[in-house]
């Protein structure tokens, strides 16, 4: 058991900051290391009694407070140190790994994250909340945050390695995702049939690679996203656009916090903004490699799949397709929908959808605000062909210029950056909230399901 005197002595030793970056970093990391040793001396969370859990929560709260005090003063300088004074494009994942190595305790190490992954979501201490803290402070800085957004819009190394083969073969099997060139269209299919094309930690990276390949291939003018065919007894042989986040994986502790951040700063934002230029030029007009995108929504688009409709240039929906954001029943923030959905349906209906679970059905009057075209079952393929032809008839340059001009007016980069700062902080807390676990048990019967 952690002695109350040890806890008080440690908390009383919290460093006074304001002596410069290097001195504050040394003092903070030393304080964090001692606090983490106090937590490590306790049993793991599932085995703690009430007093031990209260002690752990007190230490964890003090750790988060110490990190916040340091980041309020030094987030921009920290980011500069980790990115060679903003000369390097460092993705979120690597940024956090560098921070964990160079500034121990500021964020968890990959090993610490992996160790917590072995526990159910409700049995974790929430080490990854520190990742959300750091990213929130970085994104809150116009200088550092805009650079991070730019870095996440660069093509991935995986895509660059595969590009020549993709251009030659016209297709790439990426496991959970398949991408192929069909005429002037690049078709991306999410293929996670066992889980009804839900998204999880295994789908984000291949989806981003596929988006990159479509954007990098000069023979492709339009991207098309659709769900693959599933073999589920309730939907045999049908395509499903997507079931959202894999809630069973979430309950079982198999969804990393970074799933949300990498997804929305990565492939979702690339669909919306395109690939960034090789150099970061803040204050200048956006230089992006972007294309028009079509979504083919069949059967249903739940959660994250529904979020994708907000970044598409044309949505084709099969009549009767259900479109909704079950954020209330999950206990998390539905990606960037809080920013984007009101542009489509208005503020009042957006609040009903996010706070109260209001659903839309393709063919109904409300869903017309989310869908550009509703077709009968069996007619989606021909509808895609017609729309690709229509969107490419006036040329790629004209189309990209128009969508870029619309985006700059609707969602300037700084608006997105500021939103993502709030999202990183709040989603980290939601991800480890006891309410999330209760919601999954009540609405999903997650405790009865197996991986």
Image: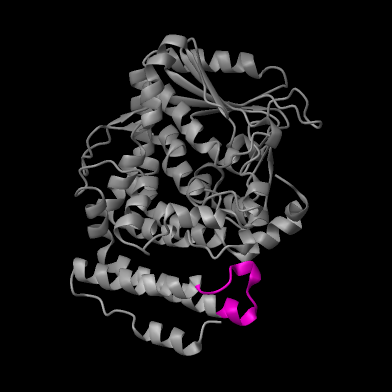
Relative image position of residue 27 (x, y in whole percent):
27, 73
For image coordinates 68% across by 30% down, the residue present is 193
Residue 156 sits in which quadrant?
top left
Query: 162 or 289: nearer the eye?
Result: 162
Tell me the quarter of the image containing the C terminus. Answer: top right
Q: Residue 334: say if magenta.
A: no
Q: Is residue 24 above or below residue 319?
A: below
Span colored in magenta: 41-54
Residue 100 sits in which quadrant?
bottom left
Relative image position of residue 188 (x, y in whole percent):
53, 24
Query: 274 or 18: nearer the eye?
Result: 18
Instruction: Answer whether residue 8 is visible to the viewer in this image.
Output: yes
Query: 135 or 186: nearer the eye?
Result: 135
> In the rendered picture of this protein, how many numbered marks are placed on residues?
0
Instruction: Answer whether residue 364 is visible to the viewer in this image.
Output: no
For image coordinates 33% across by 20% down, the residue present is 397
Q: Is residue 231 left or right of residue 220?
A: right
Q: Is residue 367 above or below residue 54?
A: above
Tell me the quarter of the image containing the N terminus. Answer: bottom right
Relative image position of residue 421 (x, y in whole percent):
39, 56
Q: Is residue 273 above or below residue 20?
A: above
Q: Residue 50: say if magenta.
A: yes
For image coordinates 28% across by 61% down, the residue present is 75
Residue 164 sits in which quadrant?
top left
Q: Is residue 172 above or below residue 435?
A: above
Q: Is residue 211 left or right of residue 201?
A: left
For image coordinates 47% across by 12% down, the residue present is 170
């Amino acid at each position: 058991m952690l002695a109350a005197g040890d806890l008080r002595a440690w908390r009383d030793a919290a460093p006074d900051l304001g002596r410069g970056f290097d001195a504050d970093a040394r003092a903070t990391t030393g304080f964090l290391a001692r606090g983490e040793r106090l937590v490590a001396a306790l049993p793991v969370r599932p085995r703690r009694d009430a007093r031990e859990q209260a002690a752990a929560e007190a230490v964890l709260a003090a750790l988060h407070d110490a990190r916040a005090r340091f980041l309020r003063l030094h987030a921009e300088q920290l980011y500069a140190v980790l990115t060679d004074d903003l000369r390097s494009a460092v993705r979120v994942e690597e940024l956090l790994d560098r921070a964990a190595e160079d500034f121990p305790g500021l964020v968890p190490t990959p090993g610490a994250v992996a160790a917590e992954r072995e526990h159910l979501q409700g049995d974790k201490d929430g080490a990854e909340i520190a990742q959300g803290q750091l990213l929130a402070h970085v994104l809150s800085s116009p200088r550092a945050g805009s650079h991070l957004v730019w870095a996440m819009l660069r093509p991935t190394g995986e895509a660059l390695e595969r590009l020549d083969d993709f251009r030659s073969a016209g297709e790439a099997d990426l496991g959970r995702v398949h991408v192929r060139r069909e005429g002037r269209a690049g078709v991306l299919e999410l293929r996670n049939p066992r889980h009804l094309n839900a998204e999880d930690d295994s789908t984000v990276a291949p989806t981003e690679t596929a988006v990159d390949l479509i954007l990098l291939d000069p023979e492709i003018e339009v991207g098309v996203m659709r769900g693959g065919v599933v073999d589920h007894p309730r939907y045999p042989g049908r395509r499903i656009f997507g079931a959202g986040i894999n809630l069973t994986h979430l309950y079982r502790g198999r969804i990393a916090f970074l799933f949300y951040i990498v997804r929305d700063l990565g492939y979702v934002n690339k669909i919306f903004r395109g690939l960034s230029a090789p150099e970061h030029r803040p204050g200048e007009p956006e230089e992006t490699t972007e294309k028009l995108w079509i979504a083919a929504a069949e059967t249903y688009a739940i959660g994250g799949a529904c979020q994708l409709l907000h970044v598409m240039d044309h949505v084709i929906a099969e009549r009767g397709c259900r479109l909704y954001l079950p954020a209330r029943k999950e206990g998390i923030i539905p990606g960037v929908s809080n920013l984007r959905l009101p542009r489509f349906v208005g503020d009042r209906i957006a609040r009903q959808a996010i706070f109260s679970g209001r659903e839309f059905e393709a063919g109904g009057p409300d869903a017309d605000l989310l869908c550009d075209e509703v077709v009968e079952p069996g007619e989606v393929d021909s509808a895609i062909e017609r729309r690709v032809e229509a969107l490419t008839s006036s040329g790629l340059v004209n189309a990209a210029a128009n969508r870029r001009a619309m985006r700059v007016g609707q969602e300037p980069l700084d608006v997105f950056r500021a939103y993502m700062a709030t999202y990183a902080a709040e989603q980290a807390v939601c991800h480890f909230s006891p309410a999330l676990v209760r919601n999954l048990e009540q609405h999903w019967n997650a405790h009865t399901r197996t991986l």
